Amino acid sequence: MPAKPPPKPTSGTKNKEAAKAAKQERRAASKQRWAQVLEAFTIQRREDKALLPLMIGVFLVVTGVGFGVGFLFHQQWVTLPLGIALGGLGAILIFGRRVQRTVFAKAEGQPGAAAWALENLRGGWKVTPAVAGTTQLDAVHRVIGRPGIVLVAEGSPHRLKPLLAQEKKRVSRLIGDVPIYDVTVGTGEGQVPLAKLPRHLAKLPRNVSKEQIGGLESKLTILATRGAAMPKGPLPPGAKMRNVQRTVRRR
């Protein structure tokens, strides 16, 4: 007699296998995030001697305040867990802020640093790196957002001035009366330090709607990119800030 073919898996079996695979993927992703946080903490602690005392101090102060407020109302054992949770959150925020500061400090002045910072912006920003540049790695990056168009330049100021003027002229031909801002990254007079670049952009006035951003992006895609080849960014080894910050927010 011919051998019977193996039974086909039922839909219920397939669903269980898919759920099991999804659970394994989530577990692996969570494990990877924790490994990244631990790696970043180890690197930061080695370079930042004040990190651990500050984290412990914030945790103890916030926990103590929570306990003290509860003690005044004879509810200290109710408010203590809340104080511990808030203290832990405060310690994590301190860690994230100091990691961010260290990463930006190491990136300051390196070619491609501004492009890296822009590509790590949170929100609805549309970033096109190196829309104009020189062989000396001076570059102008274009950012589209609620303020309108922002041209972010990095490099030598005297070489950037004609680059910015030329790019402004090209962009203005296509976008009409939409505001165009220019920002030069650096530590000199009139420049914006790399660490303050995200905050500087966030403070610009809102001039266009979210719906208009897509239209502006479509119009500007016809501009040929003639920028110099720029490195992806000077992110220091081991300090994966974007992943760390995302993990901190999820915690």
Image (spheres, rainbow, N blue to C red):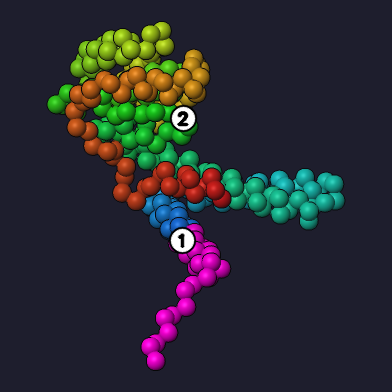
Magenta region, residue range: 1-28
Is residue 226 visible from the viewing direction of this image? yes
Q: For mark 1, does the 10 Å Cα neighbourhood hold few (<14), some (14 to 19), or many (20 or more) residues?
A: few
As measured in the structure, the alpha-carbon distance from the residue carrying label 1 to the one carrying label 2 is 28 Å
Instruction: Provide the secondary structure element on which disc 1 rests.
Output: helix
Question: Label 1 belongs to which residue?
Answer: 25
Q: Which residue is mark 2?
A: 124
Furthest residue in direction bottom, as rendered: 1
Q: Which quadrant of the view contains residue 185? A: top left
Task: Confirm or deny contact between disc 1 and disc 2 (CB under 8 A).
Answer: no
Is 9 placed left or right of 120 in the picture? right
Q: Which mark is residue 232?
A: none
Q: Residue 143: give x, y in percent of width and height.
A: 37, 24
Amino acid type, mark 2? Gly
Name the residue: 38% across, 8% down: 176
Query: Looking at numbered disc 1 in the image, what kind of residue is underneath it?
Result: Glu
Q: Main structural element of the magenta stretch: helix, strand or loop?
A: helix
Residue 139 at least partly seen: no
Label 2 environment density (alpha carbons within 10 Å; few <14, some 14–19, many ≥20): few
Residue plotted at (27% across, 38% down) = 232
61 or 232: nearer the eye?
Answer: 232
Kindly give the residue lying farthest to the left in the view shown.
Answer: 135
